[in-house]
Image: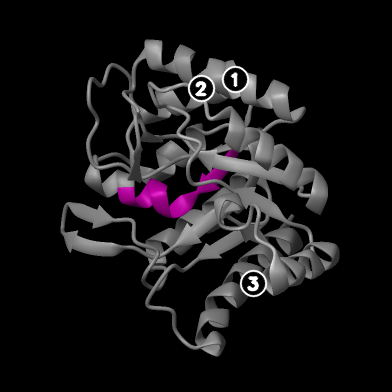
Amino acid sequence: MEVAPENWINVGGRYGKAFCEYTEKFPFVLHGLSLSIGSPAPLDWNLLKQIKQFMAEHSICFYTEHLSYCSDHGHLYDLMPIPFTPEAVDYVADRIRQIQDFLGQRIAMENVSYYAAPQQEMTEIEFTNAVLEKADCSLLLDVNNIHVNSINHDYDAEQFLAALPGHRVVYGHIAGHYSEADDLRVDTHGADVIEPVWDLLQSAYQQFGVFPTLLERDFNIPPVDQLMLEVDRIKALQAAEQTYA
């Protein structure tokens, strides 16, 4: 199970009790929304203290976040692109190392969708790999974001995938998106997964081995039996690759 810690920290009452019952039955991971790893503002150590305590209380397996930022003097409520520069690599990697030292374990950063590339001195794949290597952190692999970015920024999704460090992948995301125009996709998590994204997930399994994969759906949620068809397709792709291997 994956939850956003910001939605559950300090939640008590019947919802808190129900949450505890679930964490006792199933393995959980945290996918944060407000760490803001690329922000010019100092790290939110109060949030990190709460996350560390929350992970201990519920035996949380892993903490993941977005390779982006969402705050400075206040929260922007959106994921903003970090400039792809060597200076930003050093800055972000240092902040990740501080967090890992504090938590006593690796965290995973998600490759994010973005719609502008300010002050770009490196490619997306160069920046992503440099941060992962310098911070020695793990990767939350979002295959839909690769597809979305490949359309919006005109690169080959399969080549991008192949260049990622597969040994750092801890789990993956797959989702649907909105097609605004032929050259513009918006990462909404509000639609069915399309065939090119399924193909990319299959390629990821073939290259990196099968990894746990979460279907993201934030709105326009269909009936459960319809939603489970996509979950079943993930399972089928995983089973096919494990059988082939």
Between disc 2 and disc 3, the foreground one is: 2
Residue pointed to by mark 3: 236
Q: Secondary structure at mark 3?
A: helix
Q: Position of residue 180 (x, y in %)?
A: 17, 61
Residue at position x 52%, y 80% in the image: 227
Helix, strand or loop at disc 1?
helix
Report which quarter residue 218 is drawn in: bottom left
Q: Sequence order check: which comes first, mark 1 or mark 3?
A: 1
Name the secondary structure under disc 2.
Answer: helix
Magenta segment range? Answer: 139-148
User: What is the distance, in whole Å, between disc 1 and disc 3 at their CAs?
Assistant: 34 Å
Q: Nearer the viewer, mark 1 or mark 3?
A: 1
Depth order, front residue of 212/237: 212
Which is nearer the N-term, disc 2 or disc 3? 2
Q: Amino acid at mark 1?
A: Ala
Residue 136, can we see it? no
**Label 2 Cα crowd, 10 Å radius (few <14 / some 14-19 / many 20+):** many
Q: Say the numbered circle drawn on residue 50.
A: none
Distance Cα–Cα, label 2 vs label 1 = 6 Å
Q: Which residue is mark 2?
A: 131
Residue type at numbered disc 3: Ala
Colour setup of the view: one colour
**Main secondary-structure element of the magenta-colored stretch:** helix
The reply to whether residue 85 is in sight is: yes
- Residue at the spot of label 1: 135
Q: Quadrant of the C terminus?
A: bottom right
Tell me how far mark 2 sits from mark 3, CA to CA.
33 Å
Whether residue 230 is situated above or below residue 209 in the rendered picture: below
Question: Badges 1 and 3: C-beta atoms under 8 Å apart?
Answer: no
Q: Residues within 10 Å of mark 3 (few under 14, many from 20)?
A: few
